[in-house]
Image (tube, rainbow, N blue to C red):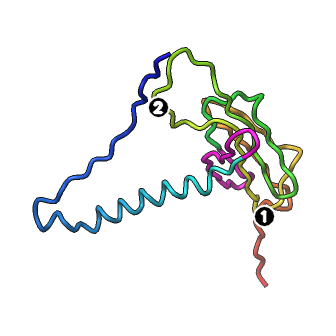
């Protein structure tokens, strides 16, 4: 069977035509930032596991007056493939992005697949019995209510 060539990105460099193009500190800083992002992506987000690559999804943490809300990007993940646990002050979101069956030839692959895990320490006492999680449009939202002791209280100031 004849293999088809895979389309690969090409990096093109141009030779400077004038002295001002030779050294542009902003372009150099951008190049350094891009190279660092590529290196850090490999170091921090891809730790090998027995069956593939483990990675952490992008997530936001918002604190309101009565709860912490964690939103994690999990596009293409089925809710039965997600596990949410709260132990003491630590929230763990784990699961797997499964490879879907395809009919054609993959020409380029940049989306992540495999096992993922996201851990965060909540900065206060939570009401573990009232935690709610929902997955909608590829975003997992976990609402962690604060315990009554962790909620701010307004204290009346008396004259004295």
114 vs 68, nearest the viewer: 114
Q: Earlier in the sequence, mark 2 or mark 1?
A: 2
Whether 23 is drawn above or below 104: the answer is below
Nearest the viewer among 13 and 154 is 13
Label total for image: 2
Rendered view: 49 above or below 137: below
In the displayed structure image, the side of residue 6 where residue 27 appears, left or right: left
Q: Main secondary structure of the magenta part?
A: strand
- Locate residue 89, reporting x and y percent: 83, 58
Residue 124 locus on image (x, y percent): 79, 62
- What is the span of residues highlighted in magenta in the rendered image? 49-71
User: Which image quarter holds the C terminus?
Assistant: bottom right
Q: Secondary structure at mark 2?
A: loop
**Label 2 vs label 1, nearer the camera:** 2
Find disc 2 in the rendering and name its residue: 108
In the displayed structure image, the side of residue 33 where residue 101 appears, left or right: right
Residue at x 60% of width, y 57% of height: 43
Rendered residue at 78%/69% (across/down) = 155
Which structural element holds mark 1? loop
Q: Which residue is mark 1?
A: 153
Q: Position of residue 7 (x, y in %)?
A: 39, 31
Q: Residue at position x 46%, y 18% from top?
A: 2
């Amino acid at each position: 069977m004849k293999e088809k060539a895979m389309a690969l990105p090409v990096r093109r460099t141009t030779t400077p035509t004038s002295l001002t193009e030779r050294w542009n500190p902003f372009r150099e800083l951008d190049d350094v930032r891009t190279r660092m992002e590529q290196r850090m992506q490999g170091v921090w987000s891809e730790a090998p596991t027995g069956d593939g690559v483990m990675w952490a999804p992008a997530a936001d943490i918002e604190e309101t007056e009565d709860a912490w809300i964690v939103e994690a990007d999990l596009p293409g993940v089925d809710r039965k493939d997600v596990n949410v646990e709260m132990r003491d002050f630590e929230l763990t979101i784990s699961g797997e992005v499964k490879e879907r069956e395809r009919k054609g030839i993959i020409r380029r692959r940049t989306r992540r697949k495999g096992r993922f895990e996201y851990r965060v320490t909540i900065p206060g006492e939570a009401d573990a019995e009232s935690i709610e999680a929902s997955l909608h449009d590829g975003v997992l939202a976990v609402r962690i209510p604060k315990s009554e002791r962790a909620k701010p209280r307004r204290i009346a100031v008396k004259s004295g």
